[in-house]
Image (tube, rainbow, N blue to C red):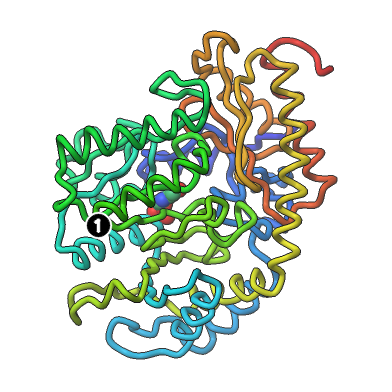
Amino acid sequence: MIKINKRISDVIKRDKKVIFTTTREIMPFVVERGDGDHAYDVAGNRFIDFSSFIATYNLGVNGNSEIRRAAKAQIDKLMHPAFLDFYSELPVKYAETLMTMFPRGFGRVFYSNSGTEAIEDAIKLSRLFTKKKYIIGFYGGFHGRSLGSLGITASKATAREGVGPFVNAVHAIYPNPYRCQFNTSLPDDCAMACIDHIERNILAKECPPGEVAAIFVEPVQGEGGYIVPPKLFMKELRRVADDNDILLVADEIQSGGMRTGKLLAMEHFGVTADIYTMAKAMGGGLPIGLTIAKKELGDTPPGSHAGTFGGNLVSVAAANAYLHYIKRNKAKLESAAKAKSKYIMKRLGKMLERYEIVGDVRGLGMMLAMEFVKSKSTKEPAVKERDAVLMEAFNNGLLLLPCGTSTIRIIPPITMQMSNIEKGLNLLEDAIAKVQGSSVG
Ligand SMILES: Cc1ncc(COP(=O)(O)O)c(C=O)c1O
């Protein structure tokens, strides 16, 4: 059981006085340091990290020594290269390396400082490339909270309330095999119903294809609930984009950078997008946003788009160390993600059988989740139970994050030792058992 001391309550009290509280979660976690599998708060409580600090520390809390060394060394050389106006070699080298890891035909990288900025850049670039204005997004999709990206985000109405109007985005239905809005029981039928809706309603009745610049899609919906679409859906979405001369933008901000065991989660679907957005894990713990486009899309006029801090050398140095690490250890990371995913899914599957409040377990690679319901037959979302499981686990030293309406993400660093994964899963199961009011087994 963790201990909440005066320092923790004091920081939280002071935080509430000076920091906007629009995004803070319920857990009293005042973080101080981290070392791989664990994070520690200011009272010295130790937590197993099943959050990767919002899908960012793929190689362990506070990154690894290579990342830290690269960032420290760069600080002493030059931090800010004014990449908007001057040239600098490191961002060029990084982009060259990244392109060797991308599908053929990719050759342009735009640097920014966060996921939402990478999306802003993708919106702007897709409009500049196509000279078209509409964007198609998906209900449940999350692409960021700045005004452009928020126009495509549709995961929670509270994020949009009172701040519109937004960019010209219309929303399509994302295939959720557990809760298909078209009431189909087979995942592929759900996929095809969603595709049919885009073609017959959105493109035929609402947004003429000649006016749609891009379709923005998450390969796995993240904040919306860790929904993995059927493979057929992504293939068909590519077809729809091709048939109608629309760009396909894959938002890999949460799913990319090896989280699913691949650099790009789209690889699992055998589909290549025209533009990719990446951030989070790619910075190795420092802020970075990347918008990556096919070379054939062309270039944008000088001066049409830029930003002061894009290409910041400390961020790029950390990102470069992360990239080289995953390039060198690709096979190892891929098989670790596969094996750990299989083990976690097996344990989650057992919890699904044992507990009535666990409605679904799902995921791709190490991007895994558990959805809570009032009962398996009604599938009514169990929000209070989900929150109670989060808190119970937290109180016993396990860091978890919510997503969707009543889901918990299970996203340990890919490098987490099996013994700690097992300990974390035991803590999760104890929490579920306690909340459901039954005992384990
Ligand atoms: C898929 C996806 N896109 C965009 C974003 C926005 O990224 P950021 O919070 O860095 O602006 C997120 C953040 O969670 C995300 O998961």
Figure check: 218 above or below 313: above
Question: Where does the image place residue 322, in percent across and percent down from the top left?
Answer: 60, 70
The amino acid at mark 1 is Asp
Residue 1, by quadrant, is top right
Question: Where does the image place residue 13, in percent across and percent down from the top left?
Answer: 47, 38
Residue drawn at 45 percent across, 42 percent down: 14
Q: Nearer the viewer, residue 90 or 222?
A: 222
Residue 200, by quadrant, is top left
Residue drawn at 58 percent across, 21 percent down: 372
Residue drawn at 63 percent across, 29 percent down: 361
Q: Left or right? Give the position of 239 relative to 330.
A: left
Numbered disc total:
1
Q: Left or right? Give the position of 50 relative to 378.
A: right
- Label 1 beta carbon within 8 A of ligand 1: no
User: How crowded is the residue under tag 1: few (<14 C-alpha within 10 Å), some, or many (20+)?
Assistant: some
Q: Nearer the viewer, residue 137 or 153?
A: 137
Residue drawn at 68 percent across, 46 percent down: 49
Figure check: 373 above or below 413: above
Q: Nearer the viewer, residue 373 or 193?
A: 193
Question: Where does the image place residue 435, in percent across and percent down from the top left?
Answer: 67, 16
List the residue tagged with mark 1: 245
Residue 34, by quadrant, is bottom right
What element does badge 1 sit on? loop
Question: Where does the image place residue 93, in percent across and percent down from the top left?
Answer: 50, 85
Figure check: 439 above or below 87: above
Question: Quarter holding the C terminus?
Answer: top right
